Image (tube, rainbow, N blue to C red):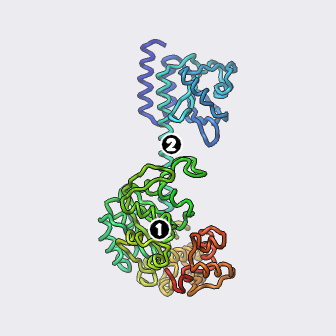
Amino acid sequence: MGVVEIEQARLATWREVSRHLDLGESVPALLAILREACGGRWMLFRRWDDEHGALRTVGCAGAADLPARVSLPRPTATAVRSWAAAGVVTVWHDRSADRVPRALVPGGLPGPVVGAPLLGPDGLDGVVLVGGIDALDADLVDAYGVALANDGRVHALARLREVAEADRRALLQRLGRQAVTEGIVGAESGLREVMARVGQVATTDVTVLILGETGSGKEVIARAVHERSSRARGPFLRVNCGAIPPELVDSELFGHERGAFTGAIGTRRGWFERADGGTLFLDEIGELPAAAQVRLLRVLQDGSFQRVGAQETRSVDVRIVAATHRDLHALVRDGSFRQDLWYRVSVFPLRIPPLRERPGDIPALAAHFAALAGERLFGAPLVPSPADHGLLVGYPWPGNVRELAAVVERAAILGDGKRLDVATALGGAVPVVVTGPAVASDPALVEALRACHGRIEGPFGAATRLGVNPHTLRSRLRRQGIDWTTFRGGRPAG
């Protein structure tokens, strides 16, 4: 290969690498450039796959029927250093003493093979193999390394987009909406006052506390605050504080450093860092354990925190929207929720009226959910009849909008997608109502709740007394229809 040819090959290779970031598109062109310069017959790129302990083919041209993966031990650091020092590795079929390079070479392909390691910041990223030549220019190897790195970034971004789109679809389905910016049913009627207050507070940056019964639409209102704010282009992230195990709350909210605790095999950003520049929705904030409340208070005061296991203090610009179905006043009184944190999160409270207080919204909500259920389940929207409206308006809806959506979907299924069988659907919607300290089939639960005055977590909580996880205990109590807050001083706490 002459000087002119090599310079032309280098220039053309870098142009191709810059033009196409997907190796699947650029490998044929890269091989054509090399073939014109020195007659290469085929080219193969493989990336190291940690999950499978193998080199996975990501681009190939001029050779067919090659295995998608080549399993082999991870090359040692010494082997990788020796490859890098050599610049290239020349491998002749069945003549290499190094079993790792020999394993890289596809069998059944005649002639000499040149292979080169493609190195990244963390070691071996992959290899490039070229058949039909005796040597490979080091500058071309550098370009091939950039091509492999670009291909990895492109596919990583594609996977992130797929995950984000799946999360978006799941969120819209959970909210019963077709688009993120879709209007809120009842905004001009039963929720008119709530939406007016949303408009007042959204343009500010103060913390908002949304109060409402389970299923009343607290997340919908929280998102409305975000969408009407200057942070609308930033992330909106929801965290269910009641679903995080107490021992992992700090790690989930604030992140952790590698080795901070058993199982922390890498550094992890917490929810606050991920929501930087946007809104963090802390659902069921009343469930946060005391230690996490202290750290949350600091973030609310000055926007600073530390990852678990780190000494460095980090700062974020995050707006907090909190929500709860609990009576935080009662939690403050019994000491399970900090009073200073209450002052911080309740700067601007928003109360969502339960569905039974706004029966005028039920027909519109039912029509909305019927259309969605019909389209999703049967391919055509359904429309409630006047008789359906009468049945729905006469029901008390202890589960609020969430229960209404479930009943309408059940009615669509019972009606075989041709109509809504609301009467039958409501027959299975009778709630378990506990008006006072409940009597459960398991007397140990009641005794523990009574002895701990309704407290679930902490050293003096019922979960510790029973030797179970607090989240497991809450789930068991919900299944048995027990409201543990009714054991607090003989009065419901929310």
Residue ID at (61%, 26%): 79
Three-letter code for the amino acid on which mark 1 is drawn:
Asp
240 or 345: nearer the eye?
Answer: 345
Residue ID at (55%, 83%): 486
Above or below: residue 1 compared with residue 395: above
Question: Looking at the image, do the residues carrying marks 2 and 1 touch, with CB atoms under 8 Å apart?
Answer: no
Above or below: residue 98 compared with residue 249: above
36 or 474: nearer the eye?
Answer: 474
Q: Quadrant of residue 107?
A: top right
User: x, y (%) of residue 189?
Assistant: 36, 79
Three-letter code for the amino acid on which mark 2 is drawn:
His
| Position of residue 233 in the picture relative to residue 282 (left or right) | left
Residue ID at (32%, 74%): 197
Which residue is the site of mark 1? 283
343 or 359: nearer the eye?
Answer: 343
User: x, y (%) of residue 195?
Assistant: 34, 73
How far apart marks 2 and 1 lie (CA) works out to 33 Å
The kind of secondary structure element at disc 2 is: helix
Count every numbered label the image shows and give the total: 2
Q: Earlier in the sequence, mark 2 or mark 1?
A: 2
Visible residue check, residue 383: no
User: x, y (%) of residue 334?
Assistant: 49, 78
Residue ID at (51%, 59%): 250
Which residue is the site of mark 2? 155
The kind of secondary structure element at disc 1 is: strand
Of circles 2 and 1, the one toward us is 1
